[in-house]
Image (cartoon, rainbow, N blue to C red):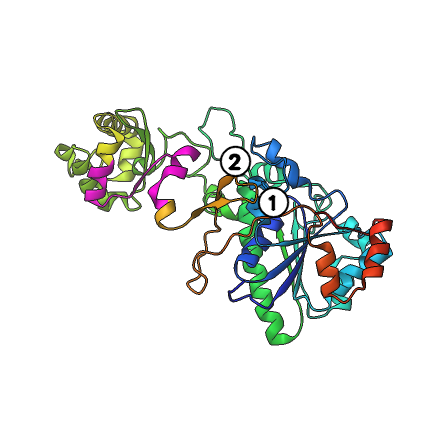
């Protein structure tokens, strides 16, 4: 594939979403990616069942293609000496190795940083973890829902105060972690080119969650802005949600509310409140008239439908967004006009909508989507490319060191 990483080879030994999603981005940018799976395959291949998608066929698995497009697949049993030697052979001309395995497993398999850095000093090493390398949680299992959503403060902050905590969106923290990983690996590849020494890139789900909540966490130490909050007690009523006449929700963002106060009030049909001293100064309004001011905005927004407000607010150049659900997003012209999404036809003849990662490079445009295949679909071809003879490949297949699937 064309792109700035064309000519780079990355070996992925990772499961589920976080690390593979980051490597998928690198593949979109032109890198050759070889995904190594154990004999039973990446468990994420079966998660189509969790999210009520099709996936019975290896040739039609949109859930797995979230992270599996543009890769090649081989099965190598790294628990065997022969399997490890195959990995090391692949790493001889690779630029990066990415894993999400836990420390004890990596050391047992000979895939830990110390071992690989000693053998391949120029190799960039990417490691996605649940929690950080230090502290009591370093060996704990960590997933999106636990390390990112729960312990980082995301899930405990982003819900209506007094209600029940929300269930995290599927893959929400994983995909953000993948973005961080892709950026870190890309930077480390530049560093290796300049210095001749490979770097280690470590990203934890917990760290990503803490980072995306860093504005709230920083504010919390001063006591004035504490989450969770209620939409009726937000410090800036212009940055809240309101229901329209047709029972749809709209989100506003007036980042400088005092400067934008008069324009906003005129736009929603309450020009009679321009420069009103009860509401135009945020600190005074919050202390003395907060509830009644939100009531005023709620009443105004309830007078028109979402379609009417979209026209009015667009003409007024006020930042807003309808609160869409997934079904709305998939029909939104924005994602099609900008090629955020793409309709893909599978070898089975089935179609699905797949989403592209957000960073778009002009040199690539819309990256092609080569849908995934079954575990071990490219095992024999990759082994041949690395100089292994047919007889040797057959011996390994018979002993289970490698597996080739159709």
Q: Residue at x 71, y 59 (%)?
A: 381
Q: Residue at x 60, y 73 (%)?
A: 193
Work out whether 397 lies above or below 350.
Answer: below
Q: Contact (CB < 8 A) between labels 1 and 2?
A: no
Report the front residue among 302 and 387. Answer: 387
Q: How many marks?
A: 2
Q: Is residue 312 magenta?
A: yes
Give the label on residue 3, or none. Answer: none
Q: Is residue 202 in view from this perspective? A: yes
- For mark 2, does the 10 Å Cα neighbourhood hold few (<14), some (14 to 19), or many (20 or more) residues? few
Q: Position of residue 48 (x, y in %)?
A: 60, 35
Residue with the mark numbered 2: 169
Of marks 1 and 2, which one's residue comes earlier in the chain? 1
Q: Position of residue 194 (x, y in %)?
A: 59, 75
Q: Position of residue 183 (x, y in %)?
A: 54, 59
Q: Quadrant of residue 62?
A: top right
Q: Residue at x 35, y 40 (%)?
A: 332
* Secondary structure of residue under mark 1: loop
Residue with the mark numbered 1: 17
What's drawn in magenta, residue-wise? Answer: 310-334
Q: Position of residue 241 (x, y in %)?
A: 34, 32
| Closer mark to the observer between disc 1 and disc 2 | 1
Q: Is residue 142 magenta?
A: no
């Amino acid at each position: 594939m064309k792109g700035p990483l064309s000519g780079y080879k990355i070996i992925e030994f990772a499961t589920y979403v976080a690390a593979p999603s980051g490597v998928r981005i690198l593949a979109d940018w032109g890198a050759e990616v070889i995904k190594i799976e154990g004999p039973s395959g990446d468990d994420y291949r079966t998660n189509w069942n969790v999210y009520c998608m099709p996936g019975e066929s290896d040739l039609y698995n949109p859930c797995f293609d979230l992270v599996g497009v543009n890769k090649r697949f081989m099965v190598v049993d790294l628990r065997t000496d022969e399997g490890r030697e195959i990995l090391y052979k692949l790493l001889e001309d690779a630029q990066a190795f990415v894993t999400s395995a836990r420390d004890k497993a990596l050391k047992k398999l000979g895939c830990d940083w110390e071992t690989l850095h000693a053998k391949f000093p120029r190799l960039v090493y990417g490691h996605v973890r649940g929690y950080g390398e230090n502290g009591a949680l370093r060996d704990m299992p960590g997933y999106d829902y636990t390390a990112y959503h729960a312990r980082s403060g995301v899930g405990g902050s982003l819900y209506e105060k007094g209600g029940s905590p929300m269930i995290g969106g599927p893959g929400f923290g994983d995909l953000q972690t993948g973005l961080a990983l892709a950026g870190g690996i890309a930077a480390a590849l530049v560093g290796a080119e300049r210095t001749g020494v490979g770097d280690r890139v470590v990203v934890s789900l917990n760290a990503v969650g803490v980072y995306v909540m860093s504005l709230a966490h920083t504010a919390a130490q001063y006591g004035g802005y504490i989450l969770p909050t209620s939409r009726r007690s937000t410090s800036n009523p212009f940055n809240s949600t309101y229901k329209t006449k047709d029972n749809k929700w709209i989100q506003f963002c007036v980042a400088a509310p005092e400067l934008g106060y008069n324009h906003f009030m005129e736009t929603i049909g309450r020009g009679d409140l321009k420069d009103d001293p009860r509401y135009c100064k945020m600190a005074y309004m919050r202390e003395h008239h907060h509830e009644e001011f939100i009531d005023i905005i709620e009443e105004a927004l309830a007078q028109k439908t979402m379609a009417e407000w979209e026209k009015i607010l667009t003409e007024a150049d006020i930042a807003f967004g309808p609160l869409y659900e997934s079904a709305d997003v998939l029909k939104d012209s924005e994602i099609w006009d900008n090629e955020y999404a793409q309709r893909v036809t599978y070898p089975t003849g089935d179609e699905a909508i797949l989403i592209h990662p957000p960073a778009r490079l002009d040199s690539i445009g819309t990256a092609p989507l080569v849908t995934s295949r079954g575990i071990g679909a490219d095992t024999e071809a990759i082994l041949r490319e690395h100089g292994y003879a047919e007889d040797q490949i057959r011996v390994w297949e018979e002993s289970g060191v490698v597996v080739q699937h159709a």
